[in-house]
């Protein structure tokens, strides 16, 4: 490539960007061929990533004071995803929550957030839902929800669940959204260990699995086997 060591170091340490044309030349150096169908997908995907890196910060950066880095990473993945298969056992998935339901569940699962922060996080969940109706290529969502998630009681606002159930019915009418319920009398299954999201992207980009727990989030990449099984 004729590059000097400082430039390579800056690129590798994410202190300097790389141009799409440079990505193309690098891939040739690595042995990929533009006229090979499988390699052509890699050229397109990585050149697009290089272009995307120069875009303005995502809308969620406005909420950087309340959105953790791990959460911001997931929203970024969600924005670029083609399909998500999600399993939740005790709550409705964020992409399907009403504002009131989001606010109540956030408030009920944290003791350190202020009222303003809870409201901001509820707004973030609503803003995320735009991917389901974005023009041209809306996100395909396959949500599997345990029956227990639909029996939660809200003492202060008892109409919360009624409103939430109505939203689920409306979302199920979208052609790109599939909602399934798992019965409370179902047999033991791997999902009892916790919720997860399987995120799939177009082209050769690896699929990502998000495993959530009280202490944070864990990301695992794969070749799409898990998603194919889910679908």
Image (cartoon, rainbow, N blue to C red):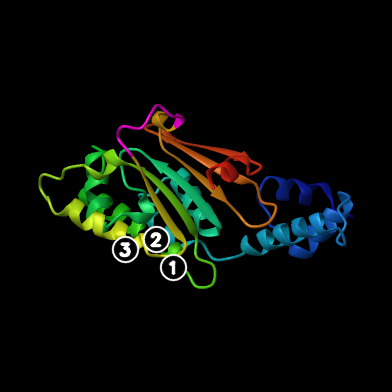
Could you tell me if residue 61 is visible in this image? Answer: no
Q: Is residue 222 left or right of residue 160?
A: right
Bin the neighbour count of mark 3 within 10 Å (Cα to Cα): few under 14, some 14-19, many 20 and up.
few
Q: Is residue 49 left or right of residue 100?
A: right
Residue 20 in the image: above or below residue 70:
below
Q: Nearer the viewer, mark 3 or mark 2?
A: 3
| Residue 61 quadrant | bottom left
Residue 39 in the image: above or below residue 226:
below
Q: Give yes or no for residue 69 being in the magenta stretch.
A: no
217 and 161: which is toward the camera = 161
Q: Position of residue 71 (x, y in %)?
A: 44, 46
> Rounded to the nearest whole Å, what is the CA distance between mark 3 and mark 1?
13 Å
Q: Residue 170: which disc?
A: 3
Q: Main secondary structure of the magenta part?
A: loop
The residue labelled by disc 1 is 133
Magenta-highlighted residues? 183-190
> Rounded to the nearest whole Å, what is the CA distance between mark 1 and mark 2?
8 Å
For the residue labelled by badge 1, is the local secondary structure a helix, a strand or a loop? loop
| Residue 219 quadrant | top right
Q: Is residue 10 left or right of residue 119?
A: right
The residue labelled by disc 2 is 129
Q: Residue 55: which disc?
A: none
Q: Residue at x 36, y 48 (%)?
A: 93
Q: Give yes or no for residue 185 being in the magenta stretch.
A: yes
Asked if the residues shown at circle 1 and circle 2 are in contact, with their CB atoms under 8 angstroms apart, the answer is: yes
């Amino acid at each position: 490539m004729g590059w000097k060591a400082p430039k390579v170091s800056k690129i590798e340490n994410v202190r300097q960007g790389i141009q799409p044309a440079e990505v193309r030349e690098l891939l040739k150096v690595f042995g990929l061929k533009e006229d090979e169908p499988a390699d052509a997908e890699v050229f397109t995907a990585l050149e697009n990533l290089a272009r995307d890196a120069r875009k303005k910060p995502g809308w969620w950066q406005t909420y950087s004071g309340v959105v953790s880095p791990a959460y911001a990473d997931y929203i970024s993945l969600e924005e670029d995803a083609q399909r998500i298969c999600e399993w939740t056992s005790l709550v409705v998935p964020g992409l399907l929550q009403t504002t009131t339901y989001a606010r109540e569940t956030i408030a009920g699962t944290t003791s350190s957030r202020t009222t303003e922060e809870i409201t901001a996080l509820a707004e973030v969940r609503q803003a995320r839902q735009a991917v389901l109706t974005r023009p041209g290529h809306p996100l395909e969502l396959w949500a599997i929800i345990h029956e227990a998630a639909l029996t939660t009681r809200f003492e202060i606002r008892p109409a919360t669940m009624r409103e939430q159930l109505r939203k689920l019915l409306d979302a199920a009418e979208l052609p790109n959204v599939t909602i399934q319920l798992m019965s409370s009398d179902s047999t033991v299954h791997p999902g009892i260990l916790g919720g997860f999201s399987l995120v799939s992207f177009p082209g050769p980009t690896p699929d990502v699995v998000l495993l959530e727990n009280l202490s944070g989030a864990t990301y695992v990449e794969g070749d799409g086997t898990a998603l194919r099984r889910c679908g």
